[in-house]
Image (cartoon, rainbow, N blue to C red):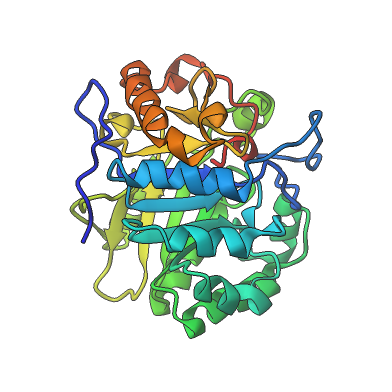
Amino acid sequence: MEKTPQIADTFGRRFPYLRLSLTDICNFRCSYCLPDGYKKTGCESFLSRDEILRLVRAFSGMGVWKIRLTGGEPTIRPDFIEIARDISGIHGIEKLAFTTNGYKLPERAKEYYEAGLSAINISIDSLNPRQFEAITGHDRLAEIMDGMNECFRVGFKTVKINTVLLRGMNDDEIDDFVDFVADKPVSLRFIELMRTGENGDYFSAHHLSGIHVTQRLLERGWSINPRSEGAGPAVEFSHEKSLGTIGLIAPYAKDFCKTCNRLRVSAKGNLHLCLFGEGGYPLRDLLQRDDQCQDLQDKIMNLMNFKKSSHFLHDGDTGATPHLASIGG
């Protein structure tokens, strides 16, 4: 049974959901995130398994029941399976999910599921193999599709697809994606391209408003679903003739931040109150011993006083986020 989250901000929003980055490193070169590939920025020291366990235990003790493992690409951490197994055994964690680019997913899906991961988001930005390679830098679309099917086979309870909307690159595939989910038990999420510190020119060239998706879905007879408890920011659509559903994550839409329900911790242990905030608050000094849990929880609760009502993307303020791989998107 889901817990009542104790973490709240000054605007009455509660936070049952933590996105935990395991690494900044990614092995893909997506044009909207790391077009030149991952570049080291000095000594890399990501949270250890012990630090991660202490962190998750503290959040669980404050009513967080959903954890999503992110990156970078989280599955390239050598101890990814061990971390998942550790977290899935923590009392109070009802849902353990992860977001992946699908690298080696066909052979690893069963291992992920058996480690306690029950929900997966797979990034697929084009259904055209050539365009997929142009966007990601890898000719792996067929492999990733096989991996998605393997997830169905091994028993994943939730399979989602993340598709970043890119004007001039995949906006002609909206109907193809809608048709793609018609016979699959998946939720496909169209995600508006977000401006970050390093992608200003790219954003100007390729940003497409989510309004285009909404209009097309309504034209095709899709309906907007009521928002469920604990759901993320996506507006969900369904159609009586489609097995799958469509979601739209549109951060530039009015009142997008009104239903914010997640916090983020970077791979180096910084708490980010907003994806586009002015930086993170370090927690790592309170992750060194088991007897620091109460101090850690107190610090997290106090930091919630600094969470703002909204991001400031409309003002061109992207905060301190250089690219989405830096704190897990």
Quarter residue 168 falls in: top right
Note whether 295 is above or below 66 in the view shown.
above
* Location of the C terminus (image quadrant): top right
Is residue 40 visible to us here? yes
Residue 135 % position (x, y): 70, 51
Q: Is residue 76 left or right of residue 179?
A: right
Is residue 122 visible to us here? no
The residue closer to the viewer here, 316 or 171, is 316
Say which residue appears at 37% left-offset and 71% top-offset.
244
Q: Is residue 288 left or right of residue 218?
A: right
Residue 104 % position (x, y): 70, 70
Note whether 9 is above or below 129 in the view shown.
above
Note whether 172 is above or below 36 in the view shown.
below
Say which residue appears at 63% left-offset and 23% top-offset.
197
The residue closer to the viewer here, 280 or 39, is 280
Say which residue appears at 66% left-offset and 29% top-offset.
199
* Location of the N terminus (image quadrant): bottom left
Residue 311 % position (x, y): 41, 23
Query: How many discs appear?
Result: 0
Residue positioned most to the bottom? 153
Residue positioned most to the front? 291
Residue 290 % position (x, y): 47, 41
Say which residue appears at 44% left-offset and 37% top-offset.
291
The residue closer to the viewer here, 147 or 80, is 80
Q: Is residue 322 left or right of residue 308?
A: right
